[in-house]
Image (tube, rainbow, N blue to C red):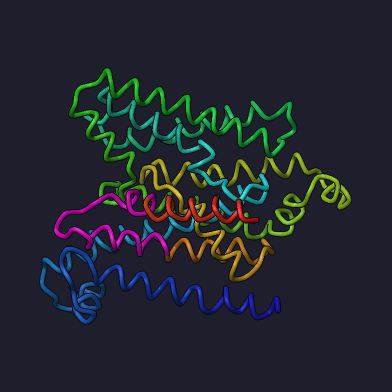
Amino acid sequence: MINKKFLFVCAFMPALVFTVFLFSLLHGSIQISFLDMLKALFGCGVDADIAVIIKQIRFPRTLMACVTGAGLAVSGCVFQAILKNPLADPFTLGISGGAAFGATAAFVIGLVSITNFFIPLCAFIGMIASVLIIYLLNVKKKFNSNSMVLSGVVVSYIFSSAVMLMFALSPSNSVQSAFVWLMGNLSTFDERLLPFIIVVVITGIIILSLSGNIINVVSLSGEKSRTFGMDIEKNIKFLFITASLITATTVSVCGIIGFVGLIIPHIMRKIIGTNNIILVPTSAFAGAVFLPLCDTLSKTLFSPLLIPVGVVTSIIGGFFFIYLLFKSERI
């Protein structure tokens, strides 16, 4: 059974990611044929406008969507395991709230007028601040799962209130720019940050994938996990910080893209089971499929208008959230 699941991860899922990647390159406000796409990618005498659309707009955007989707899905998978909470993800835990606060501050203060790099920088600093607050609040609680969830909710409310306060005191143009960023947007990120994002996220995913056995032990109840002779608290810290760093890296560039980390682990858990050795990398591949598809939908649904991809994921995630709540009530 394990071998079949491993084959599913190693063969089918990467092929699916590649197929969705090509599909996303072809579709948008302007439909491009497969042959023209290949010519544009390899520089074989295609129309200059098509070449620009494929190589400078859609290719980096789709690549960012794949990396971001993979990172958020893995982070959600790890958070759900270590907190033993099926509704845990970077969005619902409040970790993204710090990024929202930092990015909004950059817009309101006017740092964006100096350079766009201040947006991801301030968002990253804000998210690290929220992670640090949650971390410090749970040191004495020995990273109890209920305590971490509650502290995440509290931190989320605090940062959300601070963002609303800045909106109330700021010029309308700053508010609108910040609001668009907060909805999650793959249209405006700086391509120069893409190599850094790829390195950090892929490295984090590899580390967490290799930590599958540790995640399995941590996800057990307290008494069972201690029988393995493992420092549970130390490993929870390590997993929490690694998953948070992945989230901070992606969200600081793309904005708040909610519910990817909630939906994907649940779907893949139904398909391949609860063994995190396989579940974590499978969730990464599934996230790299889900977010590009949502982004393609955001580009084509109201074409030629582009809607933020975070709106699409939040609508889908909201209905999925309701489904989980009703399912848990029946159980």
Which residue occupies 43% across, 54% down?
319
Q: Is residue 276 above or below residue 20?
A: above
Q: In this view, does 57 lie above or below 248?
A: below
Query: Residue 169 lies in what quarter of the image?
Result: top left
Q: Is residue 57 left or right of residue 11?
A: left
Residue 202 percent across, percent down from the top left:
51, 57
Q: In this view, does 292 lie above or below 179?
A: below
Name the outermost residue toward the front: 330
Seen from the viewer's position, the closer of residues 171 and 231 is 171
Residue 260 percent across, percent down from the top left:
46, 54
Magenta-drawn segment? 290-314
For the N terminus, the quadrant is bottom right
Note whether residue 232 is visible: yes
Residue 295 forms part of the magenta stretch = yes
Seen from the viewer's position, the closer of residues 118 and 152 is 152
Query: Residue 8 lies in what quarter of the image?
Result: bottom right
Q: In this view, does 306 lie to the left or right of 228?
A: left
Name the dominant secondary structure of the magenta segment.
helix
Q: In this view, does 168 lie to the left or right of 278?
A: left
Q: Is residue 285 left or right of residue 312?
A: right
Note whether residue 203 is visible: no
Which residue occupies 39% across, 49% down?
314
Which residue occupies 61% across, 47% down?
79
Residue 111 percent across, percent down from the top left:
28, 26
Residue 107 percent across, percent down from the top left:
28, 29
Q: How many labels does the image show?
A: 0
Seen from the viewer's position, the closer of residues 223 and 227 is 223
For the C terminus, the quadrant is bottom right
